[in-house]
Amino acid sequence: METLGNLKILIVDDEPANLKVLYNILKAYSLRLFMLQDSTIVLSTIQKEIPDLILLDVMMPEIDGYELCKKIKENKQYEHIPIIFISALNDTSDIVRGFEIGGVDYIVKPFRNEEVICRIKTHLTIQKQKKELWKLNENKDRFFS
């Protein structure tokens, strides 16, 4: 099984069965997995440790995934974190809403293991490339100043 490095993924879903399924799909890839069932503690959790990617359920009590995504994206410190929505909602309007508020992808439940892995790999690769570009731009700016 290939490794995806020591990257951190935060999984937020109020259903323990969904957390278990996602954990079982991802555990073989040497990822650091953090799981939360309570959407109200996500912001305080990412203050302590910023994840490389968030898998976020849409339908949760207290704060739904859409509202939580908005709150995360409003904060300059966290706006760069890619958020992949996971939901049983599969209507086009639900999916489009997820993209409009800042999600990078949307996975419909029930999960298909290969699809979950491919989408996560894609967005982790993009995130890694963005970080490399930021560093190159910083070096360029220092060089020319």
Image (cartoon, rainbow, N blue to C red):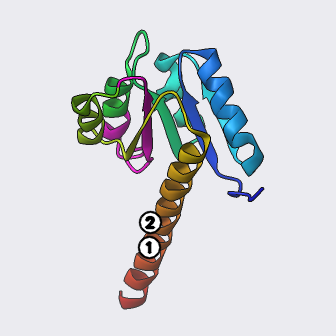
Instruction: Indicate yes or no whether the magenta region holds residue 14.
Output: no
Quadrant including the N terminus = bottom right
Q: Is residue 100 visible?
A: yes
Residue position marked by numbered label 1 in the rendering: 133
Q: Which residues are magenta?
A: 72-89
Q: Is residue 81 magenta?
A: yes
Three-letter residue code for mark 2: Lys
Residue 74 locus on image (x, y percent): 30, 38
* Residue density around tag 1, few if under 14, some if 14–19, many if 20 or more, within 10 Å: few
Name the residue type under label 1: Leu
Q: Do the CB atoms of the residues marked 1 and 2 lie less than 8 Å apart?
A: yes
Q: Secondary structure at mark 2?
A: helix
- Callout 1 secondary element: helix
Q: Residue at x 50, y 58 (%)?
A: 122
Q: Relative to 115, say whether 90 is above or below.
A: above
Q: Which mark is residue 130?
A: 2
Residue drawn at (53%, 22%) of the image:
13
